[in-house]
Image (spheres, rainbow, N blue to C red):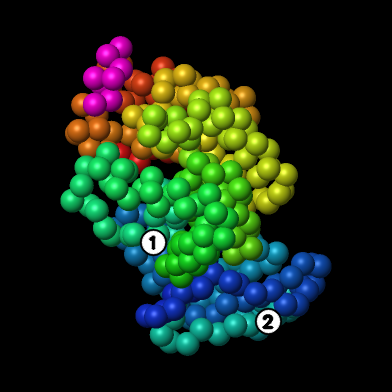
Amino acid sequence: MHWADRRVCVCAPADCSIHLHSSRASKSGGVMDVYRGTVVHCLRPQEMELLPDHLIGVENGQIKFVEPGERLEELKEQHSFTVHTLPNSQFLMPGLVDAHNHPSQYSYTGTGYDLSIQQRLEMFKIPTEAKFADIETARTIYQKAVRRSLLNGTTTASYLATVHLDSTMELCRICADAGQRVHVGKVNMDHEQTKNSTQHSVEETRKFIKSVREMKNPLMEPAVAPRFASTCSQPLLKALGDLASELAVPIHSHLGQQREEVTRLLQDNPSSRNPAHLFEMAGMLNSRVCYKT
């Protein structure tokens, strides 16, 4: 990927920030800032390139050039900018991409991994996520989760929130304020334990997609997000597949994370050959899906 298509994070042993401030207008009429320091990136797997003393020019949120530091005076003749020089303990790198993140689970990160998917769902996820009906609780957790994500250098993330429309919209506002590029999905379930109806789940998802698009944030896109197949009825999956097709949004979910889950899923859906086939029958396998396995 070309540098102009990327976002950049500034990394240090105990600090990382993607907030690249703009200050002065360039001669082309935009706003230009130049960051000077060591640049690290990878053009191919297992192949890292280290670029000491390089310049990255940022204008209106886009990378305009990556040049050696020795070209600074020459570039000043072409642009008007402010130079931000990094200390030796820091370096610049392309921002990281987190393709699957549950910010609602931030408060119990690292616990319950000795349990099955279903046990963890019942003991941790559903009780914790029920608290996200309160928007203040959601705001507190989501702010911490997004901040931690950014501090770790993640400039692009795919977030799966909870079943709650209002708190999921709060997550969207937090991401917008932080300047993180995101896909955000309002989780869908109509399993008997969740007390969510199929119709309500679909209607809330449609409202969510509409609300996100009304924000007109170029860094944000709504997603359809069934939690995973065993928490959704086939009618719900089919309705969500139709909705994703109708509104042209991506789909994010889980696919066969544990053997017990797959066994139970196939027992409940004898016409399905495997978990992927179940999603395929619902119209949820296409070029815009992201499934965690």
For badge 2, the amino acid type reads Thr
Q: Which residues are magenta?
A: 264-271
Splitting the image into 4 quarters, where does residue 242 fall? top right
Q: Position of residue 111 (x, y in %)?
A: 26, 58
Which residue is painted at 20% across and 33% down in the image? 260
Whether 80 is among the magenta residues is: no
Q: Residues within 10 Å of mark 2 (few under 14, many from 20)?
A: some
Disc 1 and disc 2: Cα gap in Å? Answer: 40 Å
Vertical placement of residue 158 versus 36, above or below: above
Label the magenta part by its dominant secondary structure. Answer: helix
Position of the C terminus by quadrant: top left
Which residue is painted at 44% across and 78% down in the image? 15
For badge 1, the amino acid type reads Ser
Q: Which residue is mark 1?
A: 107
Report the front residue among 67 and 167.
167
Splitting the image into 4 quarters, where does residue 104 fall? bottom left
Splitting the image into 4 quarters, where does residue 255 fall? top left
Judged left or right of residue 133, residue 271 is left
Q: Position of residue 278 (x, y in %)?
A: 36, 21
Q: Residues within 10 Å of mark 1 (few under 14, many from 20)?
A: few
Q: Position of residue 162 (x, y in %)?
A: 48, 45
Q: Which residue is mark 2?
A: 82
Whether 266 is among the magenta residues is: yes
Report the front residue among 60 and 248.
248
**Which label lies toward us, 1 or 2?**
1
Judged left or right of residue 222, residue 111 is left
Examine the rendering and report whether any part of residue 105 can be seen.
yes
